[in-house]
Image (cartoon, coloured by chain):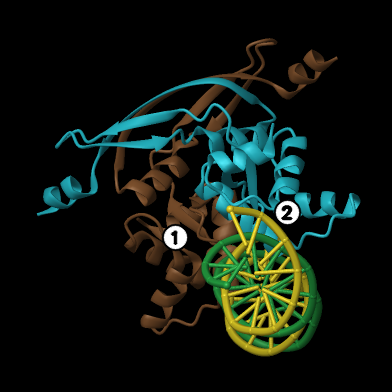
Chain colours: A brown, B cyan, C green, D yellow
Amino acid sequence: MDAEFCLREKNIKVTNSRIWILNIIDGFNGVFSADNIFDRCKEKSINIDLSTIYRNLDLFEEKGIVDKFDLGHGKYNYKIKIDAHQHLLECSICHKEVIIDCPMTQVEELIKNKTGFILTDHELKVKAICGECVNKEKK
Amino acid sequence: MDAEFCLREKNIKVTNSRIWILNIIDGFNGVFSADNIFDRCKEKSINIDLSTIYRNLDLFEEKGIVDKFDLGHGKYNYKIKIDAHQHLLECSICHKEVIIDCPMTQVEELIKNKTGFILTDHELKVKAICGECVNKEKK
DNA sequence: CTGCGTGCAAATGCTTTGCATATGT
DNA sequence: ACATATGCAAAGCATTTGCACGCAG
């Protein structure tokens, strides 16, 4: 992964901290937390503050570079977004559509965490009603 | 909902706090947090400590009465478990099986939170490999 | 009676924020 | 040059814990 390219591509200002963080993240295969990055920095004697890590993880999430989720341990975990396919949600009533990032990432991690099983593939179909139609129905 | 019955059924010692909490939870339709319960207690002038609420929510989660999940707001949300169907996960390699509670609850809430859409139905198929087979593959 | 449940107060731990300085474009 | 990013220290906030007392079985 070329960290610098990745940053430019997303219109994020290129800084040393960000390059280091991206490279470190890339070294973990899979899930990591803010202080995993912090620890790795200390190992490498790179001085990056935890707050900087949090600020950048937030930024990366916003820019679609990482996913942020929770496994119920009272802290956030992150994961590089790869193969980030999307799903189309269509309201069964008014047929309005929205696109969402595949929500299975977090489910995968949850299942891995609870059972040790690794999801290799999924097929997800959902039916949904949009908020407005729900409200109309109530009246 | 008969709170007392619900508790006995799950072999949980019946206490006033627990009955109150269950009844309050039942009054919310849908998602709630620990301090939603706390606030409602204060409104009703019932003296239940937040720590008691947390302790009991943990217990209820363990006993399968509620689901605990996170919407990315830095706090936990809970939801009464209704229609708690399960999924069978089978390892594609050794065919070992595990049963998990349907993981879509959290997805539902996440989607409701992000898009306003309410999921009304889902169909989920997954392929998975168990931890041991993953390790064997690595060698 | 006896152990579990609870209130209270304090601690914990992750995450966020304010501010002065440093850095990238 | 100028806005943005960062380090540092301190604050914030949800959740947890220790302890003495109270209550259910």
Chain of the residue that carries numbered disc 1 in the rendered image: A
Question: In the drawing, what numbered circle is on residue B17?
Answer: 2
Q: Position of residue A50 (x, y in %)?
A: 55, 74
Q: Is residue A77 visible?
A: yes
**Res. A53 image quadrant:** bottom right
Q: Position of residue A11 (x, y in %)?
A: 57, 52
Query: Nearest the camera: C10 or D11?
Result: C10
Circle 1: element type = helix
| Type of the residue with mark 2 | Ser
In this rendering, position of residue A1 left or right of residue A60: left
Circle 2: element type = helix
Q: Position of residue C4 (x, y in %)?
A: 56, 62
The residue sitting at 16% across, 45% down in the picture is B133
Count of numbered labels shown in the rendering:
2
The residue sitting at 47% across, 44% down in the picture is A106
From this view, report whether residue D15 is shown above or below residue B129. Answer: below
From this view, report whether residue B109 is shown above or below residue A126. Answer: below
Chain of the residue that carries numbered disc 2 in the rendered image: B
Q: Position of residue B45 (x, y in %)?
A: 90, 54
For label 2, the crowd category at 10 Å Cα-Cα, with few meaning under 14, some 14 to 19 and many 20 or more, is some
Q: Mark 1 — residue?
A: A4
For label 1, the crowd category at 10 Å Cα-Cα, with few meaning under 14, some 14 to 19 and many 20 or more, is some
> Which marked residue is nearer to the observer: mark 2 or mark 1?
2
Query: Nearest the camera: B122 or B51?
Result: B51
The residue sitting at 38% across, 49% down in the picture is A114
- Name the quadrant of the N terminus of chain B: top right
Q: Is residue A63 visible?
A: no
- Name the quadrant of the C terminus of chain B: bottom left
